[in-house]
Structure formats: structure tokens, C-alpha cells
Amino acid sequence: MNDYIVELKNISKIFGDKAVLCDIDLSIKQKEFVTLLGPSGCGKTTTLRIIGGFEHATTGDVYFEGKKVNDIPPFKRQINTVFQKYALFPHLNVFENIAFGLKIKKIDKDVIQEKVKEMLRLVNLQGFENRKIDSLSGGQQQRIAIARALVNEPKVLLLDEPLGALDLKLRKGMQIELKKIQQRVGITFIYVTHDQEEALTMSDRVIVMSEGEIQQIGKPEDIYNEPVNRFVADFIGEGNILDGCMLEDFSVKIQEKVLPCVDKGFEKNEMVEVLVRPEDIEIVRENDGMMKGIVISVIFKGVHYEMEVKDELGFHWMIHSIHMSKKGQQVGLVIVPDAIHIMKKGA
Amino acid sequence: MKKKWLSIPYALWALIFSIAPLVIIAVYSFCSRSPYGKIIYKFTFEHYRKFMEPIYLNVLWRSLLLAMISTVVCLLVGYPMAMIISKASLKKRNILMMLFVLPLWTNFLLRTYAWMVLLRDQGPINQLLLSLGIIDEPLKLLYNTGAVTLGMVYNFIPFMVLPVYSVLAKMDECLIEAAKDLGATSTQVFLKITLPLSMPGVVSGIIMVFMPAVSTFVISDLLGGGQTILLGNLIQNQFLVARNWQFGSAISMIMMVLIVIAMTISSKYKSEDGGGLW
Amino acid sequence: MVKKLIKRGYALLVYLFLYLPIFLLILYSFNDSKYRGSWSGFTLRWYKELFKDRTIVAALYNTFAIAILSALIATIIGTISAIAIHKMSPRWKMTFMNVTYLPVMNPDIVIGISLLALFVALKMHLGFFTILLGHITFNTPYVILAVLPKLKHLNPYLEEAALDLGATPMQAFFKVVLPEIMPGVVTGGLLAFTLSLDDFMVSFFTTGSGVNTLSIKVYSMTKLGVSPKINALSTLLFIGVLSLFVLLQSREKNIKE
């Protein structure tokens, strides 16, 4: 037996005449925090629902701990879900909501009492047992939804944009807390979001999806630093993406300039796409740079300045720097080899 | 707010045509009666005492019983129906629901009269059974409590389906999925989630069926053929035939109190945003 | 699969129960026999006689006149009142809502006899006018209850925006607020119209000698023997309602598209 807990093999899903998922292959390890990331309509929620058993794949198989579970209904899977907008039962109080799954399993009353208490401690809501659902804040409802799922001791927890309804500050706090909870309970979390920052902060691995296909799977750092294609580069973080030509190993031509880089393994004169992150570009005096440009806008962002520099060929470079340049100033740009990331065209 | 004066016409209207008539009835119910049936403004409890006589209590009991039976039948038949409709696709749902309300738009008297025709000795049901040789002589389908109950169910069942449906249709599918996710079977989902959450609709439905059922006199008059005397028949009789308005008013007051009691009890089970008709 | 079949069968049965009596009336309206029991051939006779029967035509006229007038007046009063109620302080709102619920929650028969008592006490002549007053009384609350939710969901700044852009309060109402709450107003009006058409109790108690509505006419006929003309009338009414329904449905579809 391998140590994968959830595996999807050749999953496709067609709604009506529209394919929402095309040939998804995915393996998720025990105790992993995996995030499905992509814009709305990319198929991430459908993927999650197929794992949860709420949706049947049109073709392909779902494995749980090495066993095929295609036709096993949701309530027989050792998987629980935290729903979008929580789906807490409005006619039950906090205790009854959390105890719902345990009562269904006809577990001893004392045990239920104990477990619910423990869960409330886990999500930092001790003493909330008798509160009504509609008397709770969004963040509190969120925690109850997590507790309600976790109390059943699932091997996998599915979270469908669980923080989407919270405001920014609360969301940041919950991100950290969710990660802590995951580490404490030590089970697999499969998380769906369209927020790239959320995905990068919390995940062990990120799966970037677009239009029903997986674009890239990898650690957050890898996804950020080495996106495989234009879509991923554009979706994750901010970046300057340009067309380029790989002259030979370690040498790329962009904007009519030949720059050294660290990438190799491309064909001679292969057309490629080049990503340079805004924080990796250095602004120097006009004649000290690799290329010249003029600053056309400067915006103060708190920690850094966000500047737009137009080069001689008319490309607008986005640059983040803690040093401010003046609008209209002639500047030079320096890009070190390490900052240049080459992507195959049309990948 | 400047707009307050806009409420004056309605306030006056309600005062004259909603509140004043009820006050008049309330006053009449405590007034004495002259030998010729005229109203004498002298306080008496006579009419309420009269209602406590067994013959009238019997009518009360029969009214309550029939209304309750029809309400329960409406619930048992209507709830599954509301559920089936609410589970249909959006397009179908509207049409199915409209089809349910459509008979309400034809005249109430005509609908009840249609059942008179159906249930007659020479009516199509008896004719069918006779020609099939199942029975030798016509069944007495009309002019009994069964026919009255049937008439009530037929006329009032949309009032049960409508509010239950509107609650079920609004219910978040997520909650059902969440319950399934937590291990509930279909039966458990129904008993623990769907049913409790649809209670506001059920309560509305019960009120909306029970109320006209307990106060009707047309259905019992047409389909009961004067054999089944209900509160409504009694009131109508006192006002239009016996010309004892004081007693009729007293019965009306008792009926209103009963309905208020029934509504207070049921409203306890009804949440704030409960599913009424609208 | 089996479950689906049971559901379909069940729904079919319930709909059959709902429509059987109506279809029967329609069938009998074409029956060439005075006795409703047996079928003795197709005829359109009852339709011709229907329009020759002065009392039925008069009842029909009264019914529609009262329904249209009462719905119209109730819609106007109800819409204005709903706007007033919407702006009230919670305490006044409660009082007004309780008064509004009174005719909704009161049994029809109590409304009928209490109005009768009022009209007699005021020495009013019972007839068309008193029926109309009665219908407006029980119709107005339904309009209010249909319009209020629309007002609740109305963006409160819309009216201010109109005023800000130079509209007079009147213009703001007719050009901005009214179009927004129109669906509620129309629903309320339609509801009032159908309730009035369907009413028997209030009309029955508030009418005087000689003034019939359709319901009263049918009621008195059931006592003396119903003519097949009534079957013909039911058929026409049902077809009218059905075509209205189809019209509304197709209009809704058009709007959606």
C-alpha cells in the first residue's frame, strides 16, 4: 500500500454539454495540507465535491486509502466537509450542531458531551454550547463548522472556501488558526480557495487549476518562484511577463537585450516566456542599468513603493522597491540572473 | 416623517370596517333580547350560557373534530406533494405550483358544487361502480360527514401545500448535504433537518386550513345536506333565519377566541422569518 | 427509479383529485340532458341559454364589477398605506400590522356577519355598494402584505438619489419608487382580484334582496336545483383562468429571456 490517502485517476466531469473537469490526476498524502487554487469556474469545487461524494465523476476513479470509492455515498466515507457559508443547522444550537454526526452514529451521551467540549476547546469557543447559531459572528460560525466536521474524526477534511465570507483581518487570523488546527489533529486537509495568498500561506502543496485542468502542482515556493506557464505566473503574485528567446543555455534575449540567466535545457533560439517578479528588479542610475526607462507612476504601498517604468521599447515594468524614484525620472534597470524565470511557451 | 399622514385613509378605513364591526359583535353578544328579538342594551351572560348546553357543545365538538381531521389529511397528503414539487427543476416547479393554485381561481361555490355532482346517487362515481357490477345499488356518498371532510380537504389543501412548499423551496441544499456529510441517511436527514426546518411552513399551513375549515358553512351545507351542523351553520342560522343576533354574535366571539388560542399555540412553533404565503 | 415512479404516480393522483371535479363540470356543460346523471349527446345549448339568462348575466356582471373595483381601490389604498407603514416607528408599525392581520386572520363568516351588523346599525341600504365596501376591507390587507416586502428590499437611497438629482417627492415616487415595487403591487392587486372573485361569505351576508354575485347565485341554485347553464359558466370561467395563466407564464418566460 502506498501512503496516498486520496487519489483521483483520469477524472472528468461533464455538466450538460460542458466539460468542467478534464482528465484530472491527483494524489494526496496523509496529513498533508493541500490547496486547490484557481479562479471561479476552474473546477476546484467540483473536484472537492467528487472527493466528498456529492458529485459523481463522468469518467475516472476516486480512491480512498487505496480502495475505489466511486459509488460510496458521502455518509459512508471517512471524509467530512466544511461548507461554503458553513451550512450550520439554524434550528439547532451550537452543541446540537457539533453533536449531530455523533448522535447519528448513536454514540454514548457522555462521550458526545466530552467530545463536543474538546472540540469547542480546539476552536477556542469554550462555553458556547447553548448559544444559538444566529447569535454567532461569522468567525465563530466558521469555527463551529470546523468543529462539527472534525468531531467525527474524519481522515480527510474538505474545506470549500471556508473563509470567503469573512473580512480581511479575520481571514488572516483564521488562516493561521486553521493551519494550527490541522497540525494538532494531524489529518489531511483539502482546501479550496481562489485567494492565492491564502493558498501560499497555509498549504504544504498547492494545485493550481484553470478551465478544468491542473496547471501545476507544487510547494508554495515552487509555484511562486517557478511557475510552469503564463497562467500560473499571472495568477500567483504579481509579475512582469514578456516574450523572450532562449539563445543558448544560461542566456536569454528579452527586449532586444541579452541577459544571463540560470535556466537551461531549451532548444537553441526557442521562443519562451519570461517572468520577472517586481521585487526582483533593481533601479539604478540611468547608465548603470541593463536597460533604460522612464518612471511613469509611483504609488506608496506602505512597506514599499510600487513603480511603473516604461522601457525604450515601450514595455511597462512593474517594480517594487523600498527606495522611491521620482515620476518622470530616467532610470536604469538591473535584473540578476537568479531573478529571471523562463517558461515554455504554450505550456 | 412627513409620510405619516399617508396612513390616515387606511387607519380610518380599518377603524370603521375592521374594528368597529367586531366591537359591535362583541357588544351584541352581551346584550339582552326583547321578546320580539330586538336588541336591548342590558348586560347579560345568557347567550354564552346557552352555548354551554349539550346540543351546542356537540356542534362545537363536531366542528373542531372535522376541522382537525381535514387539517391532518391536508398535511399528510400535502406535505409529500410540496416536497415533490420543491425537488423538481426550477421551470417545472413554477408550473406545478401554478397548477396547484389554479383551481383556487375558479369559484369556490362551483368547486364544491362539482363534488355534489360527482357524489350524487346518479353521479358518475356511482354509475361507474354500478356498471362495473361492484355494487348493486348506489352508495350514499353525499350528505354525510365523509363528504364534508372531503369537501374541506379539496378546497383547502392548496393552503397547506403553498406555505410548506415556499419554505422547502427556500431551504439551503447545503444543509442537507452537510447532514449527509455528517453521516445521516435520507430518513435521518428528513426527520432531523428537513422536517424541523419546514415547521414554520407547516404551522402556517395548519392555521390556514384549520381556520376556514372550522368556520365554513357552505361545505357542510352543500355536501352535508343539513345533516352536519357546524359552528358556521349555527352562526348563519342565528343571523339569517332565527334572527337571534345576540346568540349568533356570542358564537362568533367564541369561535374567534378558539382561533386566537389555536394561533397562539401554533405561533410558538413558528420562527420569526416563518414561511407565510408571501 | 422505483422511487421516482412512486413520486410521479403520487403527484398524478393528487392532481387528478384536484382537477377531476372541474373536468367533470366541463364535460357536463356539453351534455344534452337536463339530468346530470346520464350522457345524451353533445350540445352547445347551455352556452346559448347562459347568455339569455338575465339573472346569471347580472350576477356575472356584479361579480366582475365588484372584483375589479375592489381590487383597484384596495391596490391604491394598500400601496399608499404600505409606504406609510414602512416608514413608521416600530411601535406604530406593530399596531398597524396587527390591524392589518385582523381581516386576514378573522374567519370570513365573522367578517361577513360583523359587517352586516355594522351596515344595519348605520342603516345602510344593503346591496352592491355594501358588498363592495366589504370586499375592499378584506382585500386591502393582502395588498399591504404583498407590497411591504418589496419596500423592505428597496434600496433606501434610491429615493434620496432621485431627490438629489432634482426630482420632487412626487416625481421620485412615480419615477423611482413605484417602478421598483411594481411587482408587489401587481401581485397584491391580482390576489385581491381573485379573492374577490372567489368570495362567498362576505358577499352573502352583506348583500340585500335582489343583488346577486356569482357565488350567491350558485348557492341559491343548489337549493332549488342547478341548471346545466352553470356548468357552461364554470367552463368559461375555467378557460378564462387557464388562458390568463398561460399568458402570465409565457410573459414570464419572455422577461427571463
Image (cartoon, coloured by chain):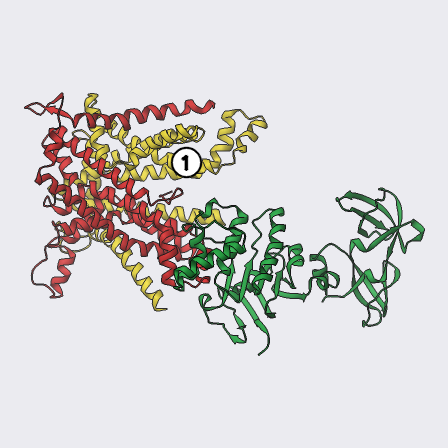
Answer left or right for A321 relative to B244: right
Q: Place residue B45 in its image quadrant.
A: top left
Q: Chain of mark 1?
A: C
Instruction: Identify the chain drawn in yellow.
Output: C
Q: Which class describes the residues within 10 Å of circle 1: few (<14), some (14-19), or many (20+)?
A: many
Answer left or right for B275 relative to A336: left
Image point (38%, 48%), residue name: B166
Residue at the bottom extreme of this rendering: A1
Image point (37%, 29%), residue name: C77
Count of numbered labels shown in the rendering = 1
Relative depth, front residue between A25 and A258: A25
Relative depth, front residue between B199 and C142: B199
Image point (16%, 26%), residue name: B30
Where residue A42 sits in the image (x, y, percent)? 60, 60
Answer left or right for C205 relative to A96: left
Q: Quadrant of the N terminus of chain C?
A: bottom left
Kind of residue sitting beneath label 1: Val
Relative depth, front residue between B217 and A276: A276
Where residue C224 sits in the image (x, y, percent)? 11, 41
Where residue B16 sits in the image (x, y, percent)? 28, 24
Q: Is residue A189 above or below residue C185?
A: below
Residue at the left extreme of this rendering: B35
Residue at the right extreme of this rendering: A287
Residue at numbered disc 1: C147
Q: Is residue B55 above or below residue A10?
A: above
Instruction: Identify the chain drawn in green.
Output: A
Instruction: Identify the chain drawn in red.
Output: B
Where residue B21 sits in the image (x, y, percent)? 24, 27
